[in-house]
Amino acid sequence: MKRTLRLLLFILLIGNVTKASHIIGGEMFYKYISRSGDNVTYQVTLKLFRICGSGQNIAELPDKVYFSIFNKASNTPFDAPLVSRATKETKSLGQVDPCIVNPPDICFQIGTYIHNITVPITGSGYVVSFQSCCRDNSMQNIVDTRNPNNEQQFPGNGATYFTELPGSTGILDNSSPYFAKDEAVLVCANKKFSYDFSAIDPNSDSLVYTFCDAYGGGYTTNQTGIPSPSDAPPYNFIPYKSPFTGSSPLGVDAVIDPKTGVISGIAPNAGKYVVTVCAYEYRNGTLLGIHRKDFHINVTTCVREVVAAMPEKYNDCSGYTVTFINNSTEGKTYDWDFGDGQKVTTTSTADLPHTYTKDGTYTVKLWVDKNSNCGDSAIATAYVYPMLRPDPRISGFCTNTTTVFTDRSTTSSTTDAINYYRWDFGNEATEEDTSLQKNATYQYPGPGNYDVILQIKTLQGCERFDTTNIIIYDKPPLTSTPDTLLCIRNSLQLFAESVVDGNVVNGTYTWTPAYNITNANTATPTISPKRDTTYTVTFADATGCTNSKQVAIDVRDTLIIRTIADSTVCTGDEVHLRAFPDGNYPLTWYNAANNAEVGEGLILNIVPLAPTVTYTVRGELGSCGGFDNVKLAVVDPPAAYAGEDTTICYGEQVILRASGGSSYQWTPTNTLGSPRNSTTTARPTDTTQYIVTVTDVLGCPKPIYDTVQINVVPPVPAFAGNDTIAMLNQPFQLNASGGTSYIWTPVDGLDNPNVYNPTTTINHDFTYTVTVYTAEGCVGRDNIKIRFIAGPDIYVPTGFSPNGDGQNDIFRPLPVGIVQMDFFRVYDRWGKLMYSTDKYMQGWDGYFNGTPAAVGTYVWVVQGKNVNDETVVRKGTVTLVR
């Protein structure tokens, strides 16, 4: 039982532990008070910054804190007085720019804790510190080190604030600096901002400001609400997220002025950032100490009603016409002052060119909505000292030598001159590939493509860049005549060249062997070999880099050409004749009958003329030649015939007869008797197109097709009418459908058996058959059974058995002489409607809402009009049995 109680108390204690993620910054500093003998007294002040508001895991500023004092030389504890909070004040954002559409709610509290500490004088002095857990885990620039599954043991980054009291090796009566302003400021994401982080030194010592790393540390606060005493130094820094660091907590575009402590620049993306500033205190060049303060800065996405924006400078000095870019809010009025007395008002944000008349540096101002209370403006500088022309010259592209970079850049301005050069040689593997010399050299580590950038600046502020892509090689590129054929009776001029980036490389050429070759030390020698020979050209550039190419010369005395064998082709077909030469040389095709040229190349596409034609293919290589012939017999294809289209009745068969060839194939085959014969039976069930493929043995291999359509009249929809009940002793008219002519049998009682609607006067139950004919002569038959009952009246059975046996399953009225059914309704004995219809010969199946109705007696009522237009109403009961 005792063990269980202890565990319960431990769980309750853990449940009351709180986190201090409400603390968003702090600083600790000291002030000299007095000295008495070997003791000295300092007033130590701790400022803690807390976010406003309350909620889960957001505690109030602690009423009391521990000032943990350690001997600086040994880091051993000296004392840890509990200090009560002296003051508490709230800071909020003051007057906000009314032109910001979404001003944020910025608010924080400052808790101040002050305590006089008297310590014995030592050589190194003392460290007074305070620690608290935990920083906000959503900070943008630091790594979240908490464990979400065990935040009690791993709560994340904490904070440590401390000050160092001087010892006898320092200045005992010194007071540390302290930061002057605790203001709520608006910092807009990705916008320019300025934040005063300056400090005051009571002794008028000089201060130097830097960004520095923030310290972590601290433990969760127990149920007392008082943070635990701090650990002894040294203290660990918190980890930062790349690309942020302690020395660059807001990114590379935000800096701190080392003299004034003002942070300025371009703010990072929206979010929360830890910023720590160190003030180095110097007296007569001697460092007395480092005072620090850290604070969480909220960067907000600000939306202004009107924003004026353009590049800050235009300094390419490429002409007197400068094109100004307007990146301002759309749909406004824009007033430009170009700084030369010329002004323009426009409503467009399109690029705006302006031409200056003389050299100079001009301040350009752009107003957006100039007359509005929320108007905005931007300033740019235009440097007009044309023409500044970058002109890099590069030579030496071999890896075995240095590459020479020569600047030939110029400016035509009489009041300006180039005074800055920077070469970037494009070697991405190192940062040591730059030079500030006007003319430079650089040896590349290996072959490849490199982007060389030349940056030039002038006295007046002009700046231009030029990028040149160069190819560095270990062998100079070399092209030459490809391997080729040569007639033994002819000569050939060879060719070689080295080209880099479109420029011809100067150098020397040497051709070997010295066999039947003239001008062997030029790029274009002439050869006349009498046997197969491979010539090698060696090129050397001015730096001694060499490369070689081989040219194989295939020497021929005669040319051997073959084409296809003689063949038979079909009249009107295009044929593709192919030649098979023994080398790559020009080919020409001729009609052998008249020697007329009909084509060139390896393949001749042509429609040959009947009855026969011979084509010759000739090859020529200088003074050498060769040829071959092909004879084509042109014959007509078979004359396929599938027969005439015809029509049959459903269920009949038809004979298909094809002609025109020696072999036949009918499709589709599923309704055919002999699909491979010229004559076959077909029994289609609906209209079908039969295709016959006809071939013959006369020499034309092409199959010919023909189609015949067999139209199938669908089954005749003969209909004599529904079996019915007629009035006894009254004529009854029949009504058939489905065709164009009709014959009724037997003819008993009929006034005309050859019409679709004869009248019968028969007075007993009888069955008639109607034979129906279509226009094509197709036949169909149907019967009608007539039952005669005295009427007009409505007959209703007294019982039914809906048990699914097919006998008496439906309860319905039998109308005799009734031409209109008004309604038929069935009720249970309590008056609930079980079934209702106004359809003729419809009835109740004994179910209600999908469930079988109970066995028993039900009430029915039926109403309709008879042939005399009289209303007939009948009522009664029916018994449902199963």
Image (cartoon, grey):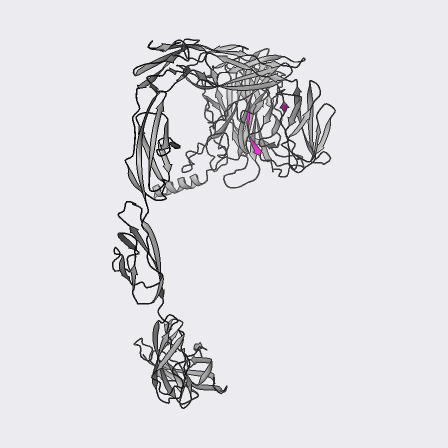
**Front in this rendered view, residue 393 or 253:** 393
In the figure, residue 549 lies in which quadrant? Answer: top left
Task: Pinpoint residue 224: horizontal percent, then vertical percent.
Answer: 49, 36
* Of residues 294 and 512, the one drawn nearer to the viewer in this rendering: 512
The x and y percentages for residue 788 are: 38, 87
Instruction: State the residue lying farthest toward the right.
Output: 341
Q: Is residue 305 magenta?
A: yes
Quarter of the rendering occupied by the N terminus: top left
The structure residue drawn at horizontal position 67% and vertical position 26%, both measured from the top left corner, is 379
- Residue farthest to the front? 594
Relative height, residue 831 to residue 148 (above, below): below
Residue 159: % across, % down: 50, 29
Q: Quadrant of residue 552?
A: top left
Q: Look at the image and tell me whether residue 173 can be seen.
A: no
Does residue 660 sit above or below 785 in this rendering?
A: above
Residue nearest the viewer, comparing 779 with 871 = 779
Quarter of the image containing the C terminus?
bottom left
* 216 to 845, vertically: above or below: above
Q: In this figure, what is the number of numbered marks?
A: 0
In depth, the one of 169 and 298 nearer the eye is 298
352 relative to 518, above or below: below
- Residue range highlighted in magenta: 292-313
Is residue 353 in view from this perspective? yes
Which residue sits at x=34%, y=73%? 779
- Queried whether the magenta region covers residue 484, the answer comes back as no
Q: Position of residue 249 (x, y in %)?
A: 53, 26
